[in-house]
């Protein structure tokens, strides 16, 4: 039976939507749903929706996106509501984070339910289970590990790739060959390797890999910006003093080299690199210069660092 208040906590929207679907399945089929953006919604309209009876259904489901912002704006009033929630509607707050030491966390946990929507620490068991249900696939452990390496903790994309594999493989079994035979995965792995070379202090090798890649994939420059952006985000995390545990899966045995390269970059150098990458992206999207050449110049800018 559904609770009257939920908080779906975590940055992965796919996992949040999964939890939301489970909650919805526990409500009457004709439940009336209202969706609000927590950055703009007014408290009065949300509470009116929760407290009014459904005209064309047997209940109300009120979902607040950007719930963090909504809580910040109306914290005390929400605390009062959660203490005594309306029984005519179910409130769901979708939050990126909600610290346990906040009063409203305890109130929601007491009156309703807190759902963790962060990606699991170990992706392979999740991939294996998700492949089996709902995709009806048996995935080899090595294939699940490869998929985790190629995609990372993007749960929506992982699920999408499993759905594509379900249409492609015969016999319902996924092997490493089935994954690597996909052209998109081959190119993604090559861009990842190029980025790793740069991230661990080998810009010359990164350029060599880049020149090979652009000969085979004309769209590589656009996806390269995404990978380079993720790398600079990781550098920022190290420079901020965060433990490397959450990103160690990306770099594995190269982690010490990556950490050294990140610290050698310095905060000032990191900001400069972000600015250069932003300018690269702007120029490429505006048709200023050759996009592949812009990426190569960015890589070479680290050659003398």
Image: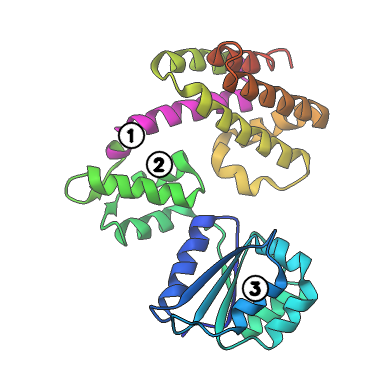
Q: Which residue lies furthest to the front in this view?
A: 55
User: Which class describes the residues within 10 Å of circle 3: few (<14), some (14-19), or many (20+)?
Assistant: some
- Report, in whole angstroms, how far the alpha carbon at label 1 lies from the one at label 2: 9 Å
Mark whose residue sits in front, 3 or 2? 3
Residue 121 visible in the current orientation = no
Label 1: element kind: helix
Residue 217, image x, y percentages: 41, 20
Judge whether residue 194 is colored magenta: yes
Q: Is residue 80 left or right of residue 300?
A: right
Quadrant of the image containing the C terminus: top right
Task: Decide which of 246, 32 is in the foreground and name it.
Answer: 32
Q: Mark 3 points at which residue?
A: 46
Between the C-alphas of marks 1 and 3, the distance is 48 Å
In the displayed structure, would residue 43 be above or below residue 144? below
Q: Which of marks 1 and 2 is nearer the N terminus?
A: 2
Identify the residue at horizontal 69%, vertical 17% (top origin): 302
Which quarter of the figure has residue 260? Answer: top right
Tell me how far mark 3 sits from mark 2, CA to CA.
Answer: 44 Å
What segment carries the magenta color? 178-203
Element assignment for label 2: helix
Q: Earlier in the sequence, mark 1 or mark 3?
A: 3
Q: In this view, does 27 lie above or below 100?
A: below
- Where disc 3 sits, the SS reads helix
* Badge 1: residue crowd in 10 Å (few <14, some 14–19, many ≥20): some
Going by the image, does 184 lie left or right of 9? left
The correct choice, above or below, for 87 with respect to 303 in the image is below
Q: Is residue 184 visible?
A: yes
Check disc 2 and report the residue beneath it: 146
Residue toward you, 225 or 49: 49
| In-image side of 251 versus 244 (left or right) | left
Residue under label 1:
180
Q: Where, by quadrant of the figure, is residue 239 drawn? A: top right
């Amino acid at each position: 039976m559904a609770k009257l208040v939920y908080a779906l906590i975590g940055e992965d929207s796919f996992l949040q939507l999964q939890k939301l679907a489970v909650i919805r399945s526990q409500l009457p089929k004709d439940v009336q749903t209202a969706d609000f953006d927590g950055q703009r919604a007014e408290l009065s309209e949300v509470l009116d929706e929760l407290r009014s009876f459904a005209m064309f259904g047997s209940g109300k489901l009120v979902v607040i996106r950007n719930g963090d912002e909504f809580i910040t704006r109306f914290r005390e009033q929400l605390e009062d509501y959660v203490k005594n929630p309306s029984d005519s509607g179910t409130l769901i707050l979708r939050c990126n984070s909600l610290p346990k030491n906040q009063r409203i966390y305890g109130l929601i946990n007491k009156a309703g339910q807190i759902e963790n929507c962060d990606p699991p620490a170990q992706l392979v068991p999740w991939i294996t289970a998700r492949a089996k249900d709902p995709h009806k696939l048996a995935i080899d452990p090595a294939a699940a590990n490869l998929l985790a390496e190629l995609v990372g903790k993007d749960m929506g994309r992982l699920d999408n790739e499993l759905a594509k594999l379900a249409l492609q493989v015969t016999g319902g079994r996924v092997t490493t060959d089935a994954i690597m035979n996909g052209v998109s995965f081959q190119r993604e792995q090559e861009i990842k390797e190029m980025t790793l070379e740069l991230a661990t202090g080998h810009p010359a090798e990164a350029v060599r890999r880049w020149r090979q890649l652009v000969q085979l994939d004309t769209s590589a420059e656009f996806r390269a910006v995404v990978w380079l952006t993720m790398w600079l985000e990781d550098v920022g995390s190290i420079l901020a003093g965060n433990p490397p545990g959450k990103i160690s899966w990306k770099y594995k045995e190269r982690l010490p080299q990556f950490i050294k390269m990140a610290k050698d970059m310095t905060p000032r150098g990191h900001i400069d690199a972000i600015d250069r990458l932003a300018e690269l992206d702007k120029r490429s999207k505006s048709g200023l210069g050759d996009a592949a050449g812009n990426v190569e110049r960015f890589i070479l800018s680290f050659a003398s660092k």
